[in-house]
Image (cartoon, grey):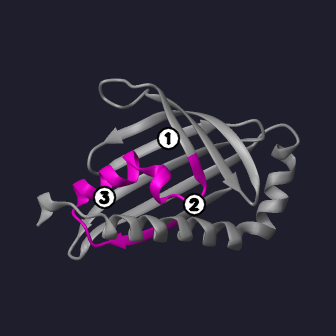
Amino acid sequence: MTMTASVIIERHIEKVFELTNDHVTEWSNIVEEEHMLEVTPKGVGSTFRTVTSEHGRRMTFEGVVTTYTPPTASGIEMEGDAFSLTADYDFEEVPSGTRVTQRSTVRGKGIFKIILPVVGLFMRKSNCKELQNELDRLKAFCESTLDTSEC
């Protein structure tokens, strides 16, 4: 199941890129904890562990950075017990700031490989809404975070 959502943030692209990637637990409603395990010099290949909570269910994922091209693109792959997730972010300068587009793909494992496509059909609208809510939280966070270097 793949979902895409976008938001325009009234901040410089470099700052939006940094806040999106380096402050996930501060803006995300889903990510509760994130711990870097190994950091590579160029970002790609860096590994991390993330704990999420969604609909009252906590899940732990092991992740790797797949794309890190400041300030225009970043991406991760995460593996959990029930499913894997790919999230790619594109950052684009627009006249009013920065457009952030997130594409997420969820792939079930085991029994969830069979269940996810069926359940996904019924939950697609709510999942897309949740993705948009996450980006709206990112927008609010980025636009409310004071940075005196931009003044």
Residues at marks 2 and 3, CA–CA distance in whole angstroms:
18 Å
Disc 2 crowd, CA 10 A, few/some/many (<14, 14-19, 20+): some
Q: Position of residue 115 (x, y in %)?
A: 86, 52
Residue at image mark 2: 29
Q: Is residue 51 above or below residue 31?
A: above
Residue at image mark 1: 76
Is 25 magenta? The answer is yes
Name the front one of labels 2 and 3: 2
Q: Where is residue 122 in the image (x, y as percent from the top left)?
A: 80, 69
| Quarter of the figure that contains the N terminus | bottom right
Three-letter code for the amino acid on which mark 1 is drawn: Ile
Is 1 magenta? The answer is no
Q: Quadrant of residue 69?
A: top left
Three-letter code for the amino acid on which mark 3 is drawn: Val
Name the front one of labels 1 and 3: 3
Q: Is residue 43 above or below residue 131?
A: above
Residues at marks 2 and 1, CA–CA distance in whole angstroms:
18 Å
The residue depicted at 57 percent of the width and 65 percent of the height is 131
The residue depicted at 11 percent of the width and 67 percent of the height is 151
Q: In which quarter of the image is residue 111?
A: top right
Residues at marks 1 and 3, CA–CA distance in whole angstroms:
17 Å
Q: Earlier in the sequence, mark 2 or mark 1?
A: 2
Q: Disc 2, disc 1: CB below 8 Å?
A: no
Q: Position of residue 26 (x, y in %)?
A: 46, 55
The residue depicted at 56 percent of the width and 34 percent of the height is 63
Residue at image mark 3: 16
